[in-house]
Image: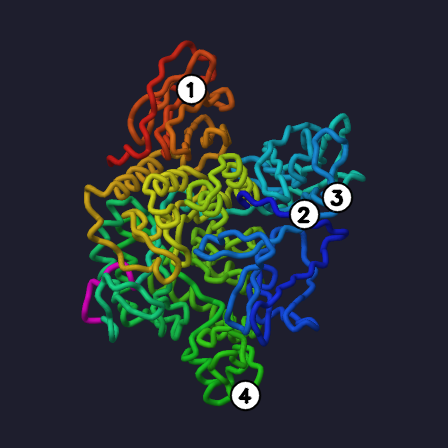
Amino acid sequence: MIGFLPALIAIQSDQVEHTFTWVADRPVKSVTLAGSFNNWDKRATSMRVGADGKTWTVTLRLNPGKHSYKFVADDETWMVDPNGKSEADGTGNTNSVLLIVPSDYAAPASPNDGVIATSALRHLTEIPDFNYDRGRLTLSLRARPNDLAQASVVVNGKRYAMQNAGGDDLYQRYVAHVPWNRRSDVAYTFELRDGAKTTTFGPEGLAGGTFRVSAKTFRPFEVPGWVERGVLYHIFPDRFENGSKANDPAGVQPWNTPPTYFNRYGGDIAGVRQRMGHLKALGVDTVYFNPIFKAPSNHRYDATDFLQVAPDFGTNEEFARLTRELKSNGIRTILDGVYNHTAVDFFAFADVVKNGAASKYVNWYTFRGFPVKIQENPNYEAWFNFPSMPKLNLGNPETRKYMLDIPRFWAKNAEIAGWRLDVANEVRMDFWQDFRKVVKGIDKNNWIVGEVWGDGSPWLKGDQWDSVMNYRFRGAVLGFVSKDGSGKPSEFMNSLMGVYASYAPQVSRNMMNLLGSHDTPRILTLCGGDRDLAKLAALIQFTWVGAPSIYYGDELGMEGDKDPDNRRGMRWDLANPQNDFLNLYRTLIKVRRSTPVLQSGDPLPLLADDAQGTAAYARVLNRDVALVALNRSAEPRTVRLDLRKLPVRPRALRDALGGQTVRPQSDGTILISLAPKSGAVLIPQSGSSSRTRLGNGSRRPATALSRAVAQ
């Protein structure tokens, strides 16, 4: 969470009662409360009006953490709390936010007072706190920020220092990497130093005890290895390219028509095939399609038939041929799976509309009465209460069997490498457990990525998904580069590391790292049209841990505000050799795909200078390193990085974007000159790594990001 320090609310237990209050400035009939605590359901929490006829209140018990919310008047007017703290949500909207903290946070934290906030301490003997990856354990401990002078873990009698791995306003994470052959059991405790006092933390808290994990019963979490090495390209099907007029829907509009919630442009399979050369030249190796199935809307998240390609997109046979062609060109296909709801003309729902309670499909959904009323405030459960999207009852065996047959069908009929799961946090977990068995049973290297805007940890323990759309990564980047961001490097690096450390390392390496999607404003728009800031965001995206995902047109410098403006027709007129965005994206992809450490290396923070507006981090993989230096400020900066923090010290580093060379000083540091709002990616020259102290070296300034546009 970026740049947010609201008043702290002390609590006495795991939950606290908090009263939300809204005072009406006009006559209203009803007010409700919607937020992250009730899945933004505007009908879940009603508020009561007081005797004055204008003060509305509701009291809830909430867990410690950050909660976003809004008031909803008369079921349609959404309002922020005029007396609360508000922040942008990354989609072009603003929400009120509330931070609830434990009671032992009442006094300021200090690493020297001998007092540890016990409510913050947490370690579980499961992923991600206990994780095996690449021949080593990662052990993670949660604590209050700035509360510990030092944390260590003693594993089978040997002590390992733990490193600060980032966090947020509530919690800090500490991690240690420990060798493990997976043949011997693991016994360990944590040692926490606060001032002169050292305390042992175990399964009984500060009372001690020893954590124990059996090598025989432990099962590591394995994700597809190809993801971390790849680059994704995200296509909204109706807006990529209209390659065939023969399948245009009625009322198709000219390509440059401003997008609305309902208009159609005619993008189709033929258009993707015609523009395959663009994908190849760009260097992507995976395409993620928003829904392609038959549906009444232009976004197709309301499927009429999950087993048929939308006729205005093409046919099943044409799509199968497209996926084979993509695969032959080294490009995988990821489908968007909507397992939460359907269209009202989906066969099962339509049958209930026709036959009422007598329908054999009546248990496929949740109805509150008959006849079925497809109207505002429908008498059945629907996604976000939209009557056009009735919610499936996946607890019903027949419904579950039908939906689990969908990935089997497309595995037989097209070359599918995985699934992105829509509103995945709203689907019951036991369905995803069955879904994983089906998809991984088809091919263990199939990728499963869920849509969750917050912390995806509950679904990333090895039994459900492989990854999530990494909106928290996006939030950290936007906080650093966007026009609305604070731009503080310390918050940026702390947020990046906090997101990374909240997942198992192999999970973080296969995160779907995005700067924009069909649900958010475009990155250039969020940067206020500042092309240098948007390029800086791209540099971070292609050098941080995870798989970069490009929303179609971002590589061309397209703009677009919140939905539907972010779904404009692809600007093919911008796809030319003079486009600095396109040239930069091609360069970044080429550098990433040719540099294994940028694909698979662990992150190591090197610098966060708030006064100068600069930050730097390294990626480390065995004896390979890469350095990334960033200048968010509007002034030229020279940053000094200490190579002694690295496991390997190169004799010379080459700026992969500009080609110039930087050499270490006699003290083992390097100086990097950066233009305003720019960055550099430094890679050791071949054969230059050394573990010895380096002698005198010369320095040449790294080329600015704004000039690094050649292929």
Q: Earlier in the sequence, mark 4 or mark 2?
A: 2
Kind of residue at disc 2: Leu
Kind of residue at disc 1: Ile
Total marks drawn? 4
Residue in the picture at 66% in, 45% down: 125
Q: Earlier in the sequence, mark 3 or mark 2?
A: 2
Q: Residues within 10 Å of mark 3 (few under 14, many from 20)?
A: some
What secondary structure is found at the residue carrying circle 4? loop
Q: Residues within 10 Å of mark 4 (few under 14, many from 20)?
A: few
Query: Which dot marks residue 370?
Result: 4
What secondary structure is found at the residue carrying circle 1? strand
Any magenta on residue 239?
A: yes
Q: Give how far across and how far down residue 313 sits, in percent.
A: 28, 67
Q: Earlier in the sequence, mark 3 or mark 1?
A: 3
- The residue indicated by pointer 2 is 8
Q: Residues within 10 Å of mark 2 (few under 14, many from 20)?
A: some
Q: Residues within 10 Å of mark 1 (few under 14, many from 20)?
A: many
Kind of residue at disc 4: Phe
Give the foreground label among 4 and 2.
2
Any magenta on residue 85?
A: no
CA separation, marks 1 and 2?
42 Å
- The residue indicated by pointer 1 is 670
- The residue indicated by pointer 3 is 104
CA separation, marks 3 and 1?
43 Å
What secondary structure is found at the residue carrying circle 2? loop
